[in-house]
């Protein structure tokens, strides 16, 4: 069992690590200052400058297949890249990405939506969550009804990431009401590609952290048959494919943040003197550092195991749910410990700890709550679809 990285993998990771240290981290104080003024922390023009710099070095479309101009990295390498990006709270991402379900688009749809999204000239959002349909995606009520050769979409979506900035949406609507009532969601829901100019509207939702979701309203929005992504009635499978596209990447990014926070906590503890000695000499501080280090190492292997299973073509859903659950819970415990280590300074907005505190709380909610992950993990075990012995058997 080889647990080491190849030379190429080390080179890729080192490039990203250096890029984050030299290009991204120096922006942190400016980002914090803007956010304190309730402005966008990383302006679009600054994000583009960073993305262009990375693209010149060949970093474009980390997970995008090579035939579409991307790097086509393995899942393990994508996870390692996310860890490095996560070491800064600056919301940087490499250019060249597109929602995975857009690769199911027809050639005409790819020309209109997929390729411009990869190139960054168009922005998408994924809309399935509704006021009454969060973790239970089967409860969606947005409907699309036939009217001649067109479809008319009516309903509301909420907590849509990037929904206020997107110029088109992948929206999921019920197209067979009877099948939906009977619980046959595999036959009742359809995905539509809908340009904003078709008439849907959005308004931002203010949240605890810097995540900027939106509510979308569809009031009789008319689209042609050519707007259907995939097949009529087969949208739910696409939605599940999108949701499960890379759950391991969320805890991977949190892992990088946790590493950085513990490093910050140790540095602070070595230099903060109380009652004549550094607080690093206090057992209470040492235990917080030790517990955090163990949590980080455990999370690292949960993330890498899930990514390895993706690369191996195995059913990785159990592993990804475990990584997502453990990462969300432990990352929140680690940021709480490190804020405690910093005392009053940790609670201020001069340091990024309170920002990470707010941001990481979201990890336990979006793209599958802790409760949903536990439900999935337990159900797979109890029904015999997975074993507590893991993938090694």
Image (cartoon, grey):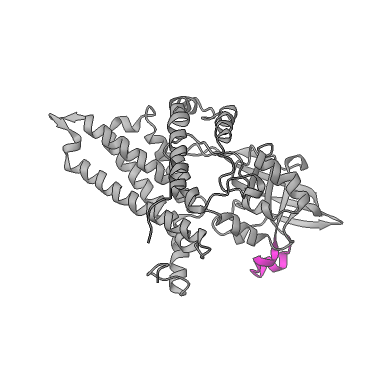
Vertical side of 230 occupied by 70: above or below: above
Query: Which residue is rendered at x = 47% and y = 74% of the image?
Result: 383
Q: Which residue is at the front of the view, 182 or 251?
A: 251
Magenta region, mostly helix, strand or loop?
helix
Q: Is residue 309 visible?
A: yes
Residue 380: where, in percent of width, then height? 47, 69
Residue 133: where, in percent of width, then height? 59, 56
Number of marks in the rendered image: 0
Q: Quadrant of the N terminus?
A: bottom left
Vertical side of 114 occupied by 341: above or below: above
- Residue furthest to the left: 276
249 sits to left or right of 156? left
Residue 197: where, in percent of width, then height? 76, 39
Q: Which residue is at the front of the view, 234 or 13?
A: 13
Residue 360 lies in the magenta-colored region? no
Vertical side of 166 occupied by 45: above or below: above
Residue 180 lies in the magenta-colored region? yes
Q: Quadrant of the C terminus?
A: bottom left
Q: Is residue 253 visible?
A: no
Q: Which residue is at the front of the view, 40 or 207?
A: 40
- Residue furthest to the front: 7
53 sits to left or right of 67? left
Region of the chain picked out in magenta, as a range? 175-189
Residue 29: where, in percent of width, then height? 43, 26
102 sits to left or right of 339? right
118 sits to left or right of 227? left
- Residue furthest to the right: 148
């Amino acid at each position: 069992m080889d647990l080491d990285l190849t030379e190429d993998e080390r080179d890729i990771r080192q490039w990203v690590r250096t890029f984050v240290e030299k290009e991204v981290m120096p922006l942190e104080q400016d980002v914090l200052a803007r956010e304190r003024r309730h402005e966008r922390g990383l302006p679009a023009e600054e994000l583009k400058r960073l993305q262009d710099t990375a693209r010149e070095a060949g970093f474009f479309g980390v997970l995008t297949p090579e035939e579409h101009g991307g790097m086509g990295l393995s899942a393990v390498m994508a996870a390692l890249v996310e860890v490095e990006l996560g070491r800064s709270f600056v919301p940087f991402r490499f250019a060249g990405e597109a929602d995975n379900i857009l690769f199911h688009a027809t050639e005409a749809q790819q020309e209109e939506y997929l390729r411009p999204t990869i190139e960054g000239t168009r922005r998408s959002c994924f809309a399935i969550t509704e006021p009454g349909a969060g973790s239970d995606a089967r409860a969606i009520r947005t409907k699309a009804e036939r009217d001649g050769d067109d479809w008319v979409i009516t309903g509301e979506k909420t907590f849509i990431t990037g929904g206020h900035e997107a110029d088109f949406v992948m929206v999921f609507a019920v197209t067979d009401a009877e099948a939906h009532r009977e619980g046959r969601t595999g036959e009742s829901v359809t995905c539509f590609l809908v340009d904003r100019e078709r008439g849907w509207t959005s308004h931002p939702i203010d949240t605890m952290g810097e995540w900027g979701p939106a509510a979308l309203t569809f009031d009789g929005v008319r689209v042609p048959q050519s707007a259907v992504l995939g097949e009529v009635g087969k949208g739910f499978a696409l939605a599940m494919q999108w949701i499960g596209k890379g759950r391991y990447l969320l805890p991977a990014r949190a892992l990088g943040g946790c590493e950085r926070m513990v490093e910050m906590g140790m540095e602070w503890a070595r230099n903060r003197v109380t009652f004549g000695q550094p607080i690093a000499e206090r057992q209470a501080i040492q235990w917080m550092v030790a517990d955090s280090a163990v949590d980080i190492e455990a999370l690292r292997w949960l993330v890498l195991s899930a990514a390895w299973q993706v690369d191996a073509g195995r059913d990785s859903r159990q592993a990804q749910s475990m990584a997502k659950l453990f990462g969300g819970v432990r990352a929140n415990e680690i940021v709480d410990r490190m804020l405690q280590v910093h005392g009053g300074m940790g609670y201020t907005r001069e340091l990024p700890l309170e920002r990470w505190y707010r941001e990481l709380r979201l990890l336990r909610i979006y793209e599958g709550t802790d409760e949903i992950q536990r439900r999935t993990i337990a159900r797979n075990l109890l029904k015999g679809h997975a074993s507590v012995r893991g993938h090694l058997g």
